[in-house]
Amino acid sequence: MPQSPRVPAAARRTMLVAAGIEIARAEGGRAVTLARVAEACGVTKPIAYRLFGSLADLLLQMERHVVAGYETVVSDALDRAAARGASRPELLDVLARAYVEHSLGAGEVYDTVSAARTAAEDVEQHVFELPGSAPRLAEVLGIPAARATGVLVMFLGAADNLVAAVQAGLLDRDAAVDHLVALFAPQLPVGDRP
């Protein structure tokens, strides 16, 4: 009987992360275990532990994967808008709309994975990670680099809470985007403010 080809560790890690995300999407983050993810990928539990070391590491990689999806969606939307010559206020609207729309699909997965990760780690070890897109967003929106981190953290907090309001039926999508744009338009350079 011929052996199946060996799957490289990096590819196997990617498969396990994707399986974990699907389990979290279907059943919530607490349903994700290394054993369940290994079974979903047809590998043994010891292989999953060798690749991740702990459930907290798997959940961290899942969280990073979801964040990378946000960054891709937002970057692509900004690139398309910039290519057609959008102004900074228009770029802010594109950023807000892309984030809100993507959050309504991927946000629940991010929230459930993040909550499971917090539960799986010591609270002191759970660190907020700023997306790598902060410098690019600051450049696109004309925000000074010294303020970029604070503005991005405020944007993420405000956007996530507005999305929660949409999910609760308190606002519609367009209102959430409008509020986000109104809140952050004062961060644009004076000459670019609407």
Image (tube, grey):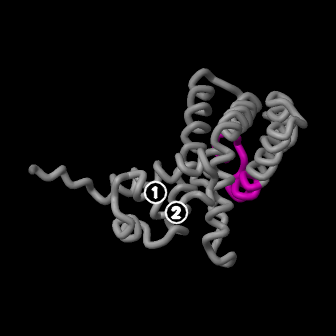
Q: Which residue is located at x 59 percent, y 57 percent? A: 31
Q: Are marks 1 and 2 in contact (CB under 8 Å)?
A: yes
**Amino acid beneath label 1:** Val
Residue 22: percent from left, percent from top: 53, 46
Q: Which residue is located at x 70 percent, y 57 percent? A: 149
**Amino acid beneath label 2:** Thr
Q: Is residue 115 magenta?
A: no
Label 2 CA crowd tier, 10 Å (few <14, some 14–19, many 20+): many
Residue 153: percent from left, percent from top: 74, 55
Q: Residue furthest top?
A: 84
> What residue did someone put label 2 on?
33
Horizontally, residue 157 falls left or right of residue 11, namely right
Q: Which residues are magenta?
A: 138-153
Q: Taking 113 as reference, is 176 above or below it?
A: above
The residue tagged with tag 1: helix, strand or loop? helix
Q: Is residue 149 magenta?
A: yes
Give the quadrant of the C terminus: top right
> What residue did someone put label 1 on?
37
Q: Which residue is located at x 73 percent, y 28 percent? A: 90
Q: Exactly how many numbered labels are in the figure?
A: 2
The residue tagged with tag 2: helix, strand or loop? loop
